[in-house]
Image (cartoon, rainbow, N blue to C red):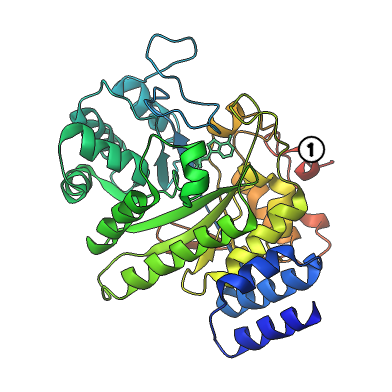
Amino acid sequence: MADLLETVEAKLRAGERLSFDDGVALFRHKDLLAIGRLANFVRERLHGDRTYFNKNMRIEVTNVCVASCLFCSFAKLEEDMPGAHTMTLQEAWRELEQRMDDPPSEVHVVNGLHPGLPFSYYEELLKGFKRIKPDVHLKCFTAVEVHFFAQHYGMTYAQVLTQLQQAGLGSLPGGGAEIFHPEVRSRISHDKATADEYLAVHRTAHAMGMMTNMTMLYGHIETFEHRVDHILRVRTQQDESRAMGANAGKVQAFIPLAFHPDGNGMKNLPAPTAVDDLRTIAVSRLLLDNVEHIKSYWVSSGPDVAQIALSFGADDVDGTIVHETIYKAAGSNRPEGMSEAALIRLIREAGRTPVERDTLYGVVREHPAALLPEGALKVKDRNANRHLQVVS
Ligand code: V47
C-alpha cells in the first residue's frame, strides 16, 4: 500500500500523469487521509488557499422530459402528469427580476427534454434574461439538452450552439454526464445522449471558444473502474480541446455529484457516504491534471462535506443557487440556497481564502482569509444549515 502512495507522489512531483490502474488503486486504498494529502498538495500547487464561489441562481424551466433516467426524481414524462411544470417565458424571467436587488452574476438553467416546445422558446428565454441584466452570464442547457435540440429541431450541434450563443448563451453546464461507460449508462440513462454524443457537444462548444463544465454522478451501481474510466474520458477530451489552440474553450471545472436515492428508480440503494465523497473529490483532483478546478457542489455533498473537501482537492463550492429543485426532489435535506455570507464563512472556517468569481473564473472580489478561530465572523443566516448557523 505504501508503495502506491510513494509511486503516486513521485509521479505528481515529476509532473507525470497517473494511469487507469493508479486511479482504481487510489479508490481502493484504505488510507483516506493520505490520499487527501496528495490531492491537497496538487490543489495548493494550483490554487494555494484560494477557494472560489459565485453569486448564481438555478432555474429549471421545465421538468417535462422524454428520457427516463433511473436516478431522476425530477422529470415527468408528459405535461399533464401530476407535478409536471413548464414555466411561461414571463414566469422564468420573473425569477431573475425578483433577484435584481442583489443580482446574481450567473443564471444556470437545466431542463427536462421537452418534446413540445419550439426552439424559439429557448432563444427567447435567453434574450429575456439579457434584457433584464445585460451582463448576466447564461450557463444554460446541458450537452444532453443540446444533443436533444439538434435531433428534435433538425440542426447540427454547431447550429444549435451558434443560435443559442446569438441569443446570449455564455457557457455550458456539466450536467447529463452521469457515468459514461456503456455498462452503466445503458442501465441508468439508456434513452438520451451517449457518452460520445455528450463529449462531441462539448468538443463542438470548445471549438467555438465556449467554456464548459463536466460532471460525474457517482455512488449508485457503478464500480471504481467505471468512475476512473469516466474521469479519464474527461481528461482525454480536455487534451483534445487544449490542442485546438488558445482561442478554443475547455473544461473549466469537474464536478463529482453524489447520488441521492429518494423518489427514483434506484431508491433501494444507499446514498454514498462522506468518505466516498471525499475520496472521489481527491481521486478526481489527482487524475485530472489538465482541468483547473474541482468543484465540491455543496448541494450534492452537503455544506459540511463540501467544506472538508476543500482540504481533499476541491477549490470551488459553486454558488448561492437560491432555488435548487433536482436534489430537493431526490430527498436532499440541504437548504435550497445559501447566502454569500454563509458561503464565505464556510470557506474561511476551512482555513481558505474566499474568492468571489464570475462564471469564467474572473475575480470579482477576493475576501481576506480568516484568522482562526473565527469568533468575529459569525453571521446570522437563516438559510445556512444548522452547523453554519450562528449563535448570537
Ligand atoms: O445532470 C439528477 C444530477 C445533474 C440526481 O456545471 C442527480 O457548474 C444526484 O449538472 N442524485 C444536474 N444527482 C446538476 C448539474 C450541476 C450542478 C452544479 C453545478 C454544475 C455546473 C452542474 O444533477 C444532472 C444529474 O447528473 N442528478 N438526479 C440524483 N437523484
Decide if residue 215 is on the left or right side of residue 296. left
Decide if residue 69 is on the left or right side of residue 295. left
Decide if residue 20 is on the left or right side of residue 160. right
For residue 164, which quarter of the picture? top left
Q: Quick one: SS at disc 1?
A: helix
Q: Quadrant of the N terminus?
A: bottom right
Q: Is residue 20 above or below residue 60?
A: below
| Amino acid type, callout 1 | Arg
Residue 218 appears at what percent x and percent y? 60, 48
Residue drawn at the location 76% of the way across and 83% of the way down: 3
Residue 324 appears at what percent x and percent y? 54, 33
Decide if residue 202 is on the left or right side of residue 307. left
Residue behind mark 1: 386
Of residues 62 and 8, the one nearer the viewer is: 8
Residue 220 appears at what percent x and percent y? 64, 42
Most extreme residue toward the bottom is: 14
Q: Is residue 168 above or below residue 265?
A: below
Residue drawn at the location 69% of the way across and 69% of the way down: 25
Q: How many marks?
A: 1
For residue 344, which quarter of the picture? bottom right
- Confirm if mark 1 falls within 8 A of ligand 1: no
Of residues 110 and 336, the one nearer the viewer is: 110
